Image (cartoon, rainbow, N blue to C red):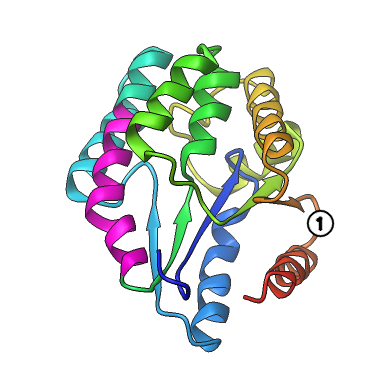
Amino acid sequence: MSSSSRFITFEGIDGAGKSTHIASVSQRLRERGAEVLNTREPGGTPLAESLRALFLHSSMDGLTEALLVFAGRRDHLRQVIVPALAAGKTVVCDRFTDASFAYQGAGRGMDLAVLATLEQWVQEGRQPDLTFWFDLPAEVAAQRRAAAREADRFEQQDLEFFERVRAGYAARAAAAPQRFARIDASLSVAEVAAQIAAHLEARGC
């Protein structure tokens, strides 16, 4: 990764509101001279987008989910993320591996050691430079989702599932506090934006 490149990810349970802020963060970075590539997971390449459709709409167990998403992640890294960073670009990604530990690990109850092995095989030590974690109680997130869109098979899960996912994110954040920026996503859009801006300023972004 060049000195000018950054890998920034956005994480949180469905309905936390992260998607609202990705475009504004990307615009801020462009205004400060960065060449920004926006992408997402699952997805980001033709292969990974095909796997995303299966992941979101076909019934499967937690291990199958993890294998699908890590296969897509490998292609995403090789085809998009690593070349962009090598070219000095800033990559802004909607979800990455923390989601696998939160959803398949904490949510589905998968063995975290298996996920850690997949993480090492697929990423070869590469991690985001900065992760914005939009933290929100599951009940509030459910209310937001219900008002916004028709639910996919993940969004149809009960509150207990999403509280486990939230706890999974908290565990990842505790394990890598230098990388994570916790955002109180229960606040207004303007207040959330201010939190994000403060974290970016602190990191010279």
Residue at 68%, 69% (x, y): give it.
Answer: 203
Nearer the observer, 179 or 11: 179
Q: Secondary structure at mark 1?
A: loop
In the picture, the quarter occupied by the C terminus is bottom right
Q: Residue 81 placed where, x, y %?
A: 33, 57
Q: Residue 97 placed where, x, y %?
A: 47, 38
In the picture, the quarter occupied by the N terminus is bottom left
- Principal SS element in the magenta part? helix
The residue that disc 1 covers is 187
Q: What number of labels is visible?
A: 1
Residue at 56%, 52% (x, y): give it.
Answer: 10
Q: Label 1 neighbourhood size at 10 Å, few (<14), some (14-19), many (20+)?
A: few
Q: Quadrant of residue 25?
A: bottom right
Residue at 67%, 41% (x, y): give it.
Answer: 176
Q: Residue 57 placed where, x, y %?
A: 33, 28
Q: Along the horizontal axis of the image, is 86 left or right of 6?
A: left
Nearer the observer, 106 or 57: 106
As shown in the figure, which amino acid type bears the numbered disc 1?
Answer: Leu
Is residue 39 highlighted in magenta?
A: no
Is residue 83 highlighted in magenta?
A: yes
Residue at 27%, 57% (x, y): give it.
Answer: 80
Magenta segment: 68-86
Q: Residue 62 placed where, x, y %?
A: 43, 15
Q: Is residue 66 above or below residue 33?
A: above
Q: Quadrant of residue 84?
A: bottom left
